[in-house]
């Protein structure tokens, strides 16, 4: 992802462990896209009624990941409290969405793929949190 | 705001105090717009270099408010942990952005207006949090 | 909406008719919220399967309105081609979403409210387009 | 990107050439992240005043890419007019942002990287448009 190339040439010093940061940014944007896609695939299933909670949590997770991805990407004059709260909100949304997707993973391949993306993003958020003061 | 009209006819029971919910939704979307506008007005100031931190926090606050506004608006199968974390992230971004805007309120009317919008949204978030289990 | 207060104190000259601009900004952010809410209300209906297309278009419209609202709000060094294309995308999403919501307006009050919000936003976009060179 | 894995298992037929679609989705989300990062890197430069137009267009491009990325990702009951308008708005924002970033590419590596991301996304949007009816 080209965000990593930009972080390398960023005029300011970086607020966190560079690898943990780059991984968190990448997982946030990737998970936002994946959850948008899983919500849509669930909506297209005949058994959509059984997937209502999954769709709802996918939409929440996409929004939380998108906000965290944008906030964490910014490295000019960051505020650690804002950054930390956004990452925590993202990790929570990822965890809850993963739990729901895992319940449907056997029947819906898109839920299996999405659960994995959410777990990776949750992990990347927690790893970054542990390196931020 | 028409979101309130929709909440009145929503097929599901509402997860929180209806007035606190409606006010939080309205303040989140309004604050997202106001912070987007203040970031842009700061960017257009001759002294933009003194407003770099303000722009940055405005952008963060717009993103946190937008995510919280969308998540809190959804009332079908809500997850309280996801909702709470999103509101907390929003309240934190609003508080920190308000503190910065207040520092420039005397010189820049847009920062004064934005600081007030952030404080109202912070309050609405905290009020909603106190009614959510 | 406080965006209008900020536009009044914006350091740069405004790129369009001020009233048409303020109204378009307000309708875009309001319609984004309303479509997010209508998608969620549709998702909570027992007959969700009949509302799949409505949910999908609501989600699209929320995203198009949000992007247009943010882009049009910015008045520092605007690019008219970018602004125009964003407004056109928003007007298209509003028109198509309104047409679908109107089909369900008799059975679902939230669709009736949402259709009206979409039509107001479509109109505000078209009015602004007619004042932008 | 895992969105491609989900498209493979999507319950509905896909509305466009699958490769062009997957590439457009990937470039939209990647370009949104890259533009968010370039806006922030520009904001952190000492010569921020010379980069005001670049920052502004980066922010617009991030929003247009994010909206198009979400809309194009959805394959359940798509509306071609909505899809086309969103892709056109994205391609326009990418083109204009690339032109501005290219002007700074010699002095700012982040602008060089961002210009390339915008050109790739513009191309992917135009390629997808040519396959959509």
Image: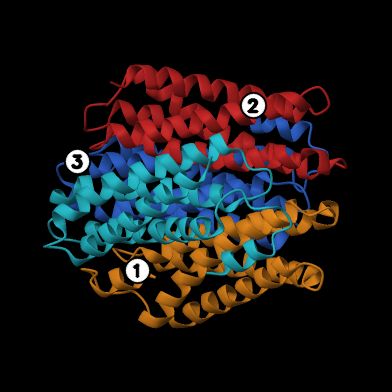
Chain colours: A orange, B blue, C red, D cyan
Q: Where is the C terminus of chain C found, in terms of image quarters?
A: top left
Image location (x, y in percent) of residue C50: 82, 38
Q: Is residue D124 left or right of residue D54?
A: right
Q: How would you rate the neighbour count of disc 3 (Cα within 10 Å): few for under 14, some for 14-19, many for 20 or more?
A: some
Q: Chain of mark 2?
A: C
Which image quarter: residue B96? bottom left
- Residue indicated by mark 3: B45
For the residues bearing labels 2 and 1, Cβ distance under 8 angstroms: no
Q: Chain of mark 1?
A: A
Secondary structure at numbered mark 2:
helix
Question: Residue at the location (34% across, 44% down)?
Answer: D93
Can residue B24 be seen in this snapshot? no
Q: For the residues marked 2 and 1, what is the alpha-carbon distance in whole angstroms?
A: 38 Å
- Element under label 3? loop
Q: Position of residue B5 (x, y in %)?
A: 71, 28
- Residue D18 appearing in the image: yes
Nearest the camera: A42 or B29?
A42
Q: Separation of disc 3 and disc 1 at Cα? A: 30 Å
The percent position of residue B71, horizontal first and vertical second, equals 63, 51
On the same chain: label 2 and label 3?
Answer: no
Q: Which residue is mark 2?
A: C98
Q: Quadrant of residue D110?
A: bottom left
Q: Which mark is residue A2?
A: 1
Which element carries disc 1, helix, strand or loop?
helix
Which residue reaches farthest right?
C46
In-image side of B64 versus B17 (left or right): left
Rendered location of residue C122, percent (x, y): 52, 23
In the displayed structure, D21 sits above or below B124; it is below
Measure how far apart labels 2 and 3 are at the Cα level: 39 Å
């Amino acid at each position: 992802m080209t965000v990593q190339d930009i972080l390398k040439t960023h005029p300011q010093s970086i607020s966190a462990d560079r690898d943990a940061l780059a991984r968190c940014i990448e997982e946030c944007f990737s998970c936002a896209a994946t959850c948008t896609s899983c919500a849509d695939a669930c909506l297209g299933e005949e058994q959509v009624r059984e997937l209502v909670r999954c769709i709802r949590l996918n939409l929440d997770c996409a929004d939380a990941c998108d906000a965290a991805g944008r906030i964490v990407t910014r490295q000019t004059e960051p505020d650690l409290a804002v950054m930390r709260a956004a990452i925590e909100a993202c990790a929570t949304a990822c965890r809850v969405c993963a739990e729901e997707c895992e319940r449907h993973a056997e029947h819906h391949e898109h839920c299996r793929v999405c659960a994995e993306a959410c777990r990776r993003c949750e992990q990347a958020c927690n790893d970054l949190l542990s390196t931020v003061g």
